Amino acid sequence: MSTAKEVEELLAGMNISAELSLIAHKVLNNTRISFEDGVYLFEHAELGFLGILANYIREKKHGDLTYFNRNFHLEPTNLCVYDCKFCSYSRLIKQKEEGWELTMEEMLDIVKKYDDEPVTEVHIVGGVLPQYDVAFYSALFSAIKKHRPNLHVKALTPVEYHYIFKKAKIDYATGMKLMKEAGLESMPGGGAEIFHPEVRQQIAKDKCTGDQWLDIHREWHKLGMRSNATMLYGHIEEFWHRVDHLEKLRALQDETGGFQTFIPLKFRNQNNQMSNVAESSVIEDLRNFAISRIYLDNFDHIKAYWAMISRETAQLSLNFGVDDIDGTLDDTTKIYSMAGAEEQTPAMSTQQLVELIRNVGRKPIERDTLYHVVTDYSDVVFEDAKKQNGYKLPVASNI
Ligand code: V47
Ligand code: SF4
């Protein structure tokens, strides 16, 4: 790991502008960068420069440790009362024949399918429908916890919560308390998209606003609970909209400290109403990871969602600020394959995830949802991997 002085010297030899030097100086001296600095980075900084700074922060916080977890997705429905323009997943209620709608029993059957699997988390995410209300989700969370008490329930987003609490005529604080009592343990980061109304109105009108998304996370954090945050980037937004989004997350994190991880989500353009919008390049994806790492100085983790960006980009991202690559999810998740992600049936075994991380010189750590270490795979050698195609699995000590 390089020291701040070594990084400063390295940058000094790179012929960078006075503005970038100043930003680098701030980062290396633990001074927060401003909104204007964030916009400047997006507009002017090259990938090499950003990688050096983001990797410095990443290694200062985590060294080579790279986290993943063992989870599965439960997607109650792909029907939705909303009509987000980027969404390849939802089918409006009028296209019902293309959709699925699981009953409580069917959902519990999916949970039971994993009874003998060493998963630690169920991630529940899907569309919004009137019958999935406060009573339904309370009963679902309670039933899952009753069936498997140590399975962590990470479920729904402010999009669903805003909708069901409004329908039940209860405020956010009361609603989140009810969800906690029912068994909800953390909230995933979805539904954030781009907070600024100028963009949100065009891509996700009608669902909860950016401020409402933030208010629901605030109430959840006030209960002492944790959540994640995302940003859907690389479509019609401008760079300053991304910085505005990061700024709002950073401010709420200062207030509550309840966020664990930030997950930038690359817009994919297949099978949705924004197919005419080009996707961002891999270089832009890596720049976005790096600037997120630099800007969100009060977030512990930056996650790359491998199912969405390909395994190779996930590996690269580990040098651009990312320290987490999500989980060993299986093909129960359809959100991304439907949007054009490379992974049509996203599944990776623990061994494959461990190798993916180790092959780029990092240390794989299986975590639970709250980042407690489950297994340190740094020095674990999978015997059968040695035999496969003459491939010799590197062990941490000889990378
Ligand atoms: O909010 C929908 C996004 C999100 C597209 O917290 C799309 O650990 C790209 O939030 N292109 C839901 N993105 C998924 C999510 C998530 C995923 C993994 C881990 C965690 C976590 C959270 O998916 C939605 C939306 O922003 N999305 N359509 C699309 N075409
Ligand atoms: Fe519904 Fe979520 Fe898709 Fe929007 S992104 S249409 S809220 S499923």
Image (cartoon, rainbow, N blue to C red):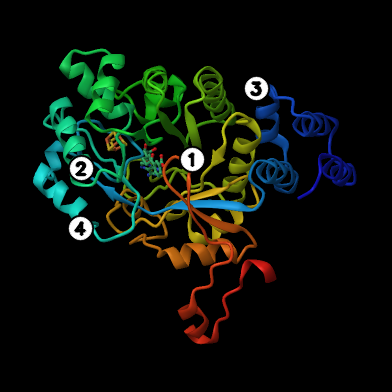
Report helix, strand or loop for mark 3: helix
Which three-letter amino acid code belongs to the residue tagged 2?
Answer: Ile
Q: Is residue 251 left or right of residue 224?
A: right
Mark 3 crowdedness (10 Å alpha carbons): few <14, some 14-19, many ≥20: some
Report helix, strand or loop for mark 2: helix
Label 3, label 2: how many angstroms apart (C-alpha)?
Answer: 43 Å
Pointer 4 or 3: first along the chain: 3
Label 4, label 3: how many angstroms apart (C-alpha)?
Answer: 47 Å
* Figure check: 233 above or below 222: below
Pointer 3 or 1: first along the chain: 3
Which three-letter amino acid code belongs to the residue tagged 4?
Answer: Lys
Please name which of the two marks, 3 or 1, marks the residue nearer to the observer: 1
Label disc, if present, on residue 4 of the rendered structure: none
- Please state which of residues 112 and 148 is positioned toward the viewer in this rendering: 148
Q: In this view, does 160 lie to the left or right of 268?
A: left
Q: Mark 2 points at which residue?
A: 144
Q: Mark 1 points at which residue?
A: 263
Which three-letter amino acid code belongs to the residue tagged 3?
Answer: Phe
Pointer 1 or 2: first along the chain: 2
Report helix, strand or loop for mark 4: helix
Pointer 3 or 2: first along the chain: 3
Q: Is residue 144 left or right of residue 363?
A: left
Q: Mark 4 points at which residue?
A: 113
Where does the C terminus fall, quadrant-wise? Answer: bottom right
